[in-house]
Amino acid sequence: MNVNTPISGLEHAWAKEGRQPRIAIIGAGFSGMGSIIKLREAGYTDITCFEREDKLGGTWRDNTYPGLSCDVPSHWYSYSFDLNPDWSYRFSYGPEIWAYQEKIARKYDLFPAIQFNNAIRKLTYLGPQWKVESEKNGEEIFDFVIAATGVLVNPAYPDIPGLDSFKGHMFHSARWNHDVALQGKRVGIIGTGSTACQIVGAIAEEVGHLDVFQRTPHWVVPMPQKKYSKAWQTLLRIFPPLQMFIRNFIRRRMEGSFGKATLGDEAEQQKIQEACLQFLEQQVPDPELRKKLTPNYKATCKRLILCSDFYPALQRDNVDLVTESIDAIEPVGVRTKDGELHELDVLVLATGFRAGDFILPTEVIGENGLSLRDFWHGLPRAHRGMTFPGFPNFWMLEGPTGVIGNTCLIDISEHQIGYMIAAINKIRDDKLVAIAPKMEAFEGYNARIAEAIKTSTWASGGCSSWYLDPSGTPNIYPWLPDAYRDDMKNIDFTEYELVS
Ligand code: N01
C-alpha cells in the first residue's frame, strides 16, 4: 500500500480486511532475526526488516575489538530453536557468534526480508497503521512496527575536555579501527568495564606501552574458558537432547547464582564477592596494586566481569594502571589531575553505551501527536518491557525494564516475541483493529517494579552503572528471569485496550 492511499479512522484494519498484516521490524540483530523466523512460523509473511548497516548481527557486527567474547556460555547463548553442537569454546568469541547469526540467516532464508543500509528516520501512528519513513523508501504504511533496536547500541563518548583535540588515532571500542596497527605503539584505554578488560588482555603483549585509565575498579571473576573437542561436538550432534540439558543446566546455574545475588540474596552476593576477592588475591600479589583494584561497592552492583587475563596483563612491565582522574585530553595524550601527561599514539574509548536511548534518537510519534521521547520524559518505561500506552500496534523488544540481568538476552527476546505474536493472533482471531496497554496497567506495573528494584544490588550496592536511568533507578527487571518468562507466556488481555 502506498502512503498516498487516504487513511481515515479505523479503515485499513488488516484483520477486518482479511489480509496479511504488513509488519516492519527495525534492526537485524538477534531479536529482529528471531522475530522474522517466529512470525513466519506463525503464518505472517509480509515482513520488512530495516537494517541501518550493511550487515546483520547487531552488537556482534558492531563490536570487533580484539579479545571480544561473550560471558554467557555458548550453549545458552543461542536460539532455543536452533542449538549449535559445533560451538568451539565454552564462551564463544565474537566472530563465531556472528558466523552463527549468518548461518541462521541463510538457513531460515532471512535475507530477502532484510533491507540493508536503510535506516528508519521517523515512525508516525496514523491509526490503526503506522507511517514508516526510511532512508531509501521514503514513506510506507505498516500495520505493526517492531523495534528490535537493541540496548547496547549507541556508543557513549566521554565528556572529557579536549577529547576532539587528540591528534593520534582515537576510536570507541564498538567502532574499532582495524586499519590502525598497535604493534609497538603507545596505547591508552579509558574504562575498565567488561569490554576494556577483554581488550587489555588481548593487546597488552603486542603494544609498546599501555596506559589503562580506571575511574572505578570493577569486580572480576575468572572466565573458565575451555575449547571443545571434536568428540564432544560429535556427541552433541548425535544426541541433541544433551544440548538442551546443558543449556538448561547453565541457565539454572547462572540465574540461581548471579540472578539471586542481584536480587537481595545476601548469601549468594557474599559468595560472589568472596570469589572475586580470592581471585584478586591470587592474581595480584602487590598489595598496592590490589588496593587500587578493589571496589568499594558490592559485587554485582555493576555488571560482574568474567575475565582471566586482565589482572595478569596489568602486571606486565609495559602496562600501567592509571587511577589518577583524567583532567583533559590533549593533542599528544591524556593529562591526569596530578599534572602528568601520558603521551599516546592511540586512544581507545571503552566507555560503554547510552543504554537509556533504546530506539531514540529515531522519532516515534504516537496517538495525538505525542512523541515517545516526551512520553518518557527522560525516564524510559514500558508495559511488561515492551509496549506503551498511546502507541498502539507497536512493540519494543528488550525495551525499558525488559532487559533482564544475569541471563541470556536471546532467550528473553524469544519469550517477548512469543508474547507479541499471541497479541497479533488475538487481533487476527477477534478481528480487532489495534492493541495498546491501558495507562493504569502501565502505571501499576511500573510502580511495582520501582518498589521491588529498591532492594536489588543494582540500586543499593553503592555504585553507578549503565543500568541506572537519570533518576538513579535501575531500568531493569527486578525479579528472577523465570517470573518474566511466566509473564510472557500468559498474556493478560485485561491489561490492554483492545480496539474493535
Ligand atoms: O561498558 P561499561 P562496557 N572517564 O559501561 C568508564 C556488555 N558486554 O562496554 O565504572 C573515565 O560497563 C567507566 O567507568 P565507571 C555487558 O553487559 C559484555 O565495558 O563508570 N572513565 C567504565 O569503566 C557490559 O556490562 C561482554 O567509573 C569513564 C567503562 O568506561 C556492557 O556490555 C563484553 C568515563 C564503561 O564500562 C557494557 O560494557 C563487553 C569517563 N568520562 C560488553 N566514562 C561480555 O559478554 C565511562 N568510563 C564479556
Image: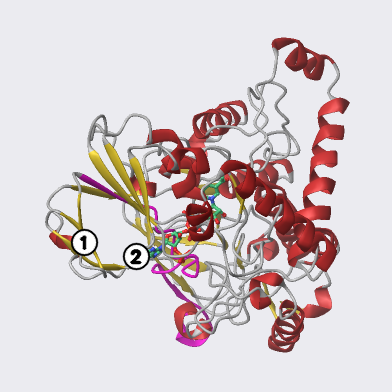
Question: Which residue corresponds to the image point at 43% horizontal and 48% vertical from the top-left?
Answer: 51
For residue 500, side relative to residue 223 (left or right): right
Q: Is residue 369 left or right of residue 381?
A: left
User: Where 213 falls versus 158 (above or below)?
Assistant: above
The answer to whether the residue bearing label 2 lies less than 8 angstroms from the nearest atom of ligand 1 is: no
Residue at screen point 85% across, 40% down:
249
Residue at 80% across, 54% down: 257
State the predominant SS element of the stretch in magenta: loop
Instruction: Find numbered disc 2 in the image and state the secondary structure of the residue it sits on.
Output: loop
Mark 1–mark 2 contact, CB under 8 Å? yes
How crowded pointer 1 is (Cα within 10 Å; few <14, some 14-19, many 20+) is rated as: few
Secondary structure at badge 1 equals: loop
Residue 28: x and y in percent read 50, 45
CA separation in Å, label 1 and label 2: 9 Å
Residue 488 in sight in this render: no
Q: Is residue 206 left or right of residue 278?
A: left
- The amino acid at mark 1 is Glu
Instruction: Give the magenta range.
Output: 346-371
Q: Is residue 251 highlighted in magenta? A: no
Earlier sequence position, callout 1 versus callout 2 = 2
Query: Residue beneath label 1, please?
Result: 340
Q: Which residue was labeled with disc 2?
A: 324
Amino acid under disc 2: Glu
Question: Is 59 rendered above or below residue 405?
Answer: above
Asked whether residue 243 is in view, the answer is: yes
Looking at the picture, does residue 136 appear above or below residue 110? below
Q: Quadrant of residue 498?
A: bottom right
Does 354 lie within the magenta span? yes
Location of the C terminus by quadrant is bottom right
